[in-house]
Amino acid sequence: MRKTSVENFEIAVLGAGTMGLCVAQFFAMNGHEVNLYNRTYANLDKALIQIRSNLQTLVSLDQISKEDLRSAMAHIHGTGDLKEAVEHADFVIENVAEREDVKKEIFAKIDEFCDEDVIFSSDTSTMNIYEFLEVSHPERLIITHFFNPAYVMPLVEVVRGPHTSDETTAVTKALLESCGKKTAVINKAIPGFILNRITMAVFREAAYIAGNGWASPEDIDKAIVSTFGPRYTFEGPFGLSDFAGLDIYERLATLLYPVLCSDTEAPSILTDKTGNGILGVKSGEGFYEYTDAAEAHRARDSKIMKMIQAINAVNNS
């Protein structure tokens, strides 16, 4: 039977990969008992080591105390037994491979192991799970799309399915918001949800400009960081359009939409690199070069946390 107070929820996180371990860390940092499941114990051990390293980085940045680190680690319980992971959970979050067969198998098992009021969520970033998952009481099935690193990024996209109940949505929002997250609800599982759609729309046009030699990737990034960067910290595209003037936006749309990129395939500026094994930070080179991937991630995470602090200070002033 699910607990009545979200603050007391026990969380089961299924999958100890990059996102799974970060989600487990996030809930543990907020005082929840977390069972982190992974089929292989070797990967589970690696995940627990990475969580401790993440927490130590937060300590070094004065984001948390050493006692906070010890407390968070004490709240995480690793297991390779799926039934053990979920049988007392109030909320289950799936982070396994983005494959239909893998997700179908694991949801079928937890459907057998869990009470009927336990909420099932998926952290998928690309898949419409509602098209292929079958669980009893589908009203308790929902998508919770976290962003990496999940213990830092403030937002979670909450995506409803055709049978997701208002109660499931409300409890999911309450749980996430009680831990300090902001939530954006999408009422239908559209491909890419909100942010991946907008991200790829921006990247398509940026790649089009760079691919035509009209501006370099470096100058495009500079332009975005120096304009969208400060503005998008406190206003989105609709708020920005209000200040620019809706008549101006209408005129810009009339002039620009016919000449913007409308390609339906990945741009060559991207596929040429991936075809040669140039994958970004993970391979040491992308549009920029990276000599130390771990240090690049630490530096980026530090910047994100400092920016969030600064943004909160501005928005709360």
Image (tube, helix red, strand yellow):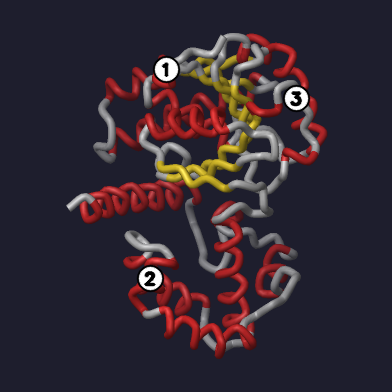
Outermost residue toward the left in this view: 317
Question: Helix, strand, or loop for circle 3?
Answer: loop
| Residue under the image location 55 percent in, 70 percent down | 202
Mark 2 surroundings within 10 Å by alpha-carbon count, few (fewer than 14), some (14 through 19), many (20 or more):
some
C-alpha separation, residue under disc 1 versus residue under disc 3: 24 Å
Residue 34 visible in image: yes
Cα–Cα gap, marks 2 and 3? 42 Å
The residue labelled by disc 3 is: 135
Residue positioned most to the front = 166
The amino acid on which the numbered mark 1 sits, given as a three-letter code, is: Ser
Tell which of 172 and 312 is nearer to you. 172
* Among the two numbered marks 1 and 3 on one chain, the one whose residue lies closer to the N terminus: 1
Residue occupied by mark 1: 5
The correct choice, above or below, for 248 with respect to 207 in the image is below
Name which residue type carries label 3.
Answer: Val
Label 3, residues with CA under 10 Å away: few <14, some 14-19, many ≥20: some
The answer to the question of whether label 2 and label 1 lie on touching residues, with beta carbons closer than 8 A, is no
Q: Is residue 168 above or below residue 79?
A: below
The amino acid sitting under disc 2 is: Leu
- Helix or strand or loop: what does disc 1 sit on? loop
Residue 161 point in image, percent of width and height: 67, 39
Image point 51% across, 24% down: which residue? 48
Tag 1 near tag 3, CB within 8 Å: no
Residue 67 at x, y percent in the picture: 27, 20
Q: Which residue is located at x 50 percent, y 34 percent?
A: 22
Is there CB contact under 8 Å for labels 2 and 3? no
- Please, what secondary structure does the residue beneath circle 2 have? helix
- Front residue of 62/12: it is 12
Q: Which mark is residue 240?
A: 2
Query: The N terminus is located in which quarter?
Result: top right
- Spot occupied by residue 146 in the image (x, y as percentages of width and height): 52, 41
Q: Position of residue 179 (x, y in %)?
A: 38, 31
